[in-house]
Image (cartoon, rainbow, N blue to C red):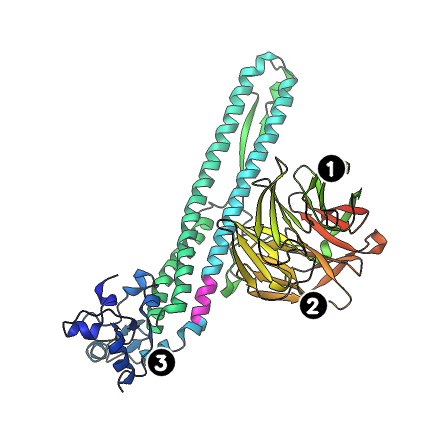
Amino acid sequence: MSSKYTVCGVCDYQNINTQSVVWCSECDEGLCEECKVHHAASKATRNHSIVQISEYQRLPSNILEITQTCSKHDEKFQIFCKKHDIPYCRRCVVETHNDCKDLNAIEDVIKNVKSSSAFSEMEQVLKELSENLQNIIKDRQENITSIRENRIQIEKEVQQTRSLINNHLDRLQEILIKELYDVEKKESTKIKNIISSIQESERKITECKSTLYTIKQHASDLQTFLAMKHIQKDVRNNENFLESLIKETKMNNVSITWKNETALKILPVQTKKMGTIILNTRAGDATLTNKKNKQAQMMMPTTPVSTIDDIKLTLRQTVNTIGQDIKSCCLLPGGRMIFSCYRSNKIHVLKSSGTSDFTLETGSTTSHIHFIEKSQKLVVTTGENNQRIEIIDMKSRKSEKSIGVGTRTFGIINKEGKLFYNGERAGLCFVNLNDDSLTQLVDVALSTCSSIATWSDQLYFIGEDDSVTCSNLQGGIKWKFKLKTFTVPRGITVDNNGRVYVSGYWTSNVIVISPDGSKHRVLLSQQNGINKPQSLFFDRINNKLLVANTCNYAFLYDISN
């Protein structure tokens, strides 16, 4: 940082080199300890707002470089001209703005700017842009997957057709498959290039969000106001970029089909082609949200949102569980099931058929479990004992790591390299897996033995008062749900549409709550064999719901809308 910020401006004027300790935005200079006292006592400056120089240095360099004085007259901005949307000094008004009628004092314009609707709208626009970019990336990645699935299916059909004819078609098959792969590669490359450009836009928006947050914390009102003008340009550029994707049909979904030659069915030996690769496109599935005009300005086709009333359950399997006091359950890829038995200190893994596969003995109470598919790790909490979180390698079936957290632990999930867990009286907390540091996210007592869940950028947990709460990843509460006739909720999980499933221990039922927390519906009860359920798990890949009673039975349901 330049000496302008590190050297006291008053002392520097007197050719004295003194370290500054605070910064006065209105004087636009730093002050040492002695000058700070005089500054606070002087009638002309006693009402000026000052901040510690270390805090002022936290502002981004491009914000610090924004001038607060007129470049022509070297005077502070005093007037804001709405007609030209630019601040001016007193002399500029006299020289060039005599005919402008809509002039305001800069103090009035910047007053309460951080709490203004314009600032809030800027935060919302940045959030929406980020969400839109993420949605488009997801949509494009899903299109790549669907193209791959098209290719796999067509390859099977080609091979089936090939089996019906003689060896004369070998070369023709190779040509067709090569064309198929070339088409897939070409179209996938196009989509990946679009994703790359979108990710770059998302990175810029993330920087804007970070800058806006830092400005809100540490910048002066004038700096905030001027910085918003700069950020607006980036916002407009990204909005135009998103609109261009739609207008230029770069968001069209691509699929591949094929048509076999008619002659192939009549005289295989004489045909020179096995088939023709056909490239189809249709409008993409991603939607862009716009708070200002969501109804009139939907930029892409929408898909009807499934509600809690659309849910249909089909009982697929009833499983005889091993052990007693089952606190938690989950499904592994391939259909295997895991159940943690609290008092027996064991975790039972069952095959998809329901028979035993193997058992893990942890040497401690096993409360809640969470499987991390990417690393093949099983995270286990210890409930009332040990105050630790165990991480087990499912390949070697041995404990890999033990993290002390200093509180009783129950429900647990993994999100973005963090283990969020139910710390009971300590509230909702998380462990950063990079350095094992602990952080309290929500200072509200959570229900003993209850689960937690995550979906998108939201967390779900059960309070000591039997309420179900939804918060963001920063701990900000979004909604809270409580039902008097639904007692001692324990298990909680979320499906692909944001619908929240909760098991009632004493009421022996399972309810589903709408994504906004405003409605609920009873899905399962004692008539379905539900008896004191403590755990449930939703498999988002296969749309299956696993519900486990405390003893004896678990039920696997297919979920459809």
Q: In this view, does 395 lie above or below 102?
A: above
- Residue 295 in sight here: no
Quarter in which the N terminus is drawn: bottom left
Residue 465 marker: 2
**Residue 550 on image: x %, y %:** 78, 52
* Distance of label 1 from label 2 (alpha carbons): 37 Å
**Residue 174 on image: x %, y %:** 53, 20
Instruction: Choose the circle earlier in sequence order: 3 or 2.
Output: 3
Q: In this view, does 471 lie above or below 82?
A: above
Residue appearing at x 46%, y 69% in the figure? 120
**Residue 508 on image: x %, y %:** 80, 58
Residue appearing at x 36%, y 77% in the figure? 109
Amino acid type for the residue under numbered disc 1: Ser
Residue appearing at x 59%, y 23% in the figure? 261
Instruction: Choose the circle earlier in sequence order: 1 or 3.
Output: 3
In magenta stretch: residue 443: no
Task: Name the quadrant containing residue 522.
Answer: bottom right
Which residue has dot 1 on it? 352
Seen from this angle, which residue lies furthest bottom? 43
Category of crowding for the residue at label 2, using alpha-carbon neighbours closer than 10 angstroms: few (below 14), some (14–19), many (at least 20):
few
- Residue 414 in sight here: yes
Q: At numbered mark 2, what does the secondary structure look like: helix, strand or loop?
A: loop
Q: At numbered mark 1, what does the secondary structure look like: helix, strand or loop?
A: loop
Instruction: Choose the circle earlier in sequence order: 1 or 2.
Output: 1
Per the rendered image, the range of residues in magenta is 118-125
Q: Is residue 243 above or below residue 157?
A: below
